[in-house]
Amino acid sequence: MKQTDAAFAVVANNCTIPVSDIPLHPFVVFERLILDAVAADQRVSALFGVVSQKSGKLELYVVLSDDAQNQINICRAEVSGSGYPSLTPKIPQAHLFEREIAEQFGILPEGHPWLKPVRYCASWSGKDAWNRTADEPIVPAVTDFYRVEGEQIHEVAVGPVHAGVIEPGHFRFQCHGELMYHVEIALGYQYRGIEEAMLGERKNRNIHYIETAAGDTTVGHTITYCQIIEALSHTQKPARAQVIRGIALELERIANHIGDLGALAGDVGYLPTSSFCGRIRGDFLNITALICGNRFGRGLVVPGGTGYDLDDSMISEILTRLAVLHQEARDAVNLLWITPSVMARFEDTGILTNEFAIKMGITGPAARAAGVGRDIRYDQPSGVYRFSQVPVSTCESGDVFARAFVRWMEIEQSLEFITAQLKALSKGSIRVAYGKLEPESLSLALNEGWRGEICHVAITNTDGGFARYKIVDPSFHNWIGLAQVLRNEEISDFPLCNKSFNLSYCGHDL
């Protein structure tokens, strides 16, 4: 599904179009189009650089999601010289994308308000954006952190090595007493070069890269990758496989949401819910293991369908387990809402405003907890969600309580969805063969992972291999949201706010 006007290639989710059909604009036009789109409530799902296969010059591609119209708008612009005027001062959603482009291609977004590395990795192009010659723009040193000046201001540095089991990340707090004025988050320690590794001819190990892009979102990222392959090869997935994929995605959502609710309870010292949810999370993961032999769903989703089927006895077993776990989860989680000491910590802590969430392109439960009704399953549905939609769960307060309660509402909706799909699962095959990928084409796919919007974009070369593979994990959008909600909070509330977002380090560091 595609149409082209003077401004954009207008497509639907999970599509393929020839690269030649994507309008190429002068940069000034490109900037104006994005400004107008964002002003009309579209959001920047992806902004990335691609070296043109024809000219050899860097082109910037933008993917704008228009949820109101259930469509996606794409255009591009060629960058001349060593830089371009930064979009970030006018379009804050672009801030991290532009830093990433500078890092990967050595092209500077001139006028970017806080230009520094995202991942401290070598430039793909061999150009160094951070150490320029005398006649080129000067940028901050790579070690610079924002500092609040004042005689009684003190700085607290946490990480990148942490005492727990979490992945490495560095947090720099500017504090006055116990009050946090500013928090800067530095990531990149988990950088593995996955996007680079995907380039070239199709490799059997590509799916393994994707399955481990963010290990707790294996199903979400793998479905999105497989939709890219299927769109580029014009493969029609079996209906049964699409339902099984949806079931797996919702099981992944439930397991992670339950784990987060238990961890939030632990952060405020409420042990009953913390203990129960830890065990219940494992039981939901075990349902995924029952289906495919792996608790995180590796091997379950493959191009052309699924690697595993559900027989009648397995469906009966899953339905029995779900009924028990639903009641156990309800008993454990509802204790949170009726316990004053818990609610005193949850309510009015770490408030993310609706305005900031929209301006910065925050996604997933964090956005919905601030009253932003974004959900790919509803706004840009693909697969089984085109036929069986899941209601969008929102809150208005934007605090820790709202982020926790949205998770609980989504658990209940997902359980209802899975139960209905299992009872009505149609007969048929689970996998079909797929052929060669369309050359010189662009394909994109969006899905609602448990953290929020997952976006993959692939551009193929003349042989059908990947000339560019762009992955945007929801954490890439949302880390700035965590930094914002920590302002003017007590430093003791940092773990609670952090867990209420529960963002991925490795999902950011692709």
Image (cartoon, rainbow, N blue to C red):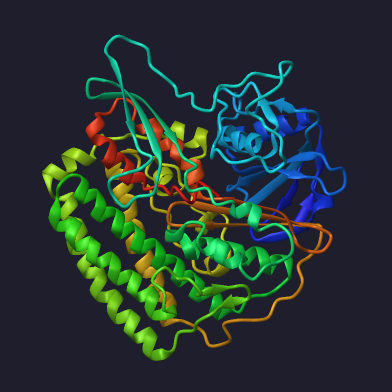
At 75% from the left and 62% from the top, the residue drawn is 465
Q: Is residue 125 above or below residue 300?
A: above
- Residue 1 shows up from this direction: no
Q: Residue at x 70, y 76 (%)?
A: 434
Residue at x 61% of width, y 79% of height:
238
Q: Give the quadrant of residue 295.
A: bottom left
Residue 26 against residue 24 in the figure, above or below: above
Question: Does residue 462 sit above or below 429 in this rendering?
Answer: above
Query: Which of the 4 image quarters holds residue 330?
Result: bottom left
- Image coordinates of residue 394 in percent, x first then y, are 38, 48
* Left or right of residue 238: residue 176: left
Q: Position of residue 62 (x, y in %)?
A: 68, 42
Residue 150: tell me if it is visible.
yes
The residue positioned farthest toward the top in the image shown: 151
Task: Kindly identify the residue that appears in the image at 44 percent across and 76 percent down.
Answer: 421
- 152, 121: nearer the viewer: 121
Quadrant of the drawing holding the N terminus: bottom right
Viewer-side residue, 365 vs 107: 107
**Location of residue 157 by image quarter:** top left
Q: Give the x, y percent position of residue 322.
A: 30, 75
- Front residue of 31/421: it is 31
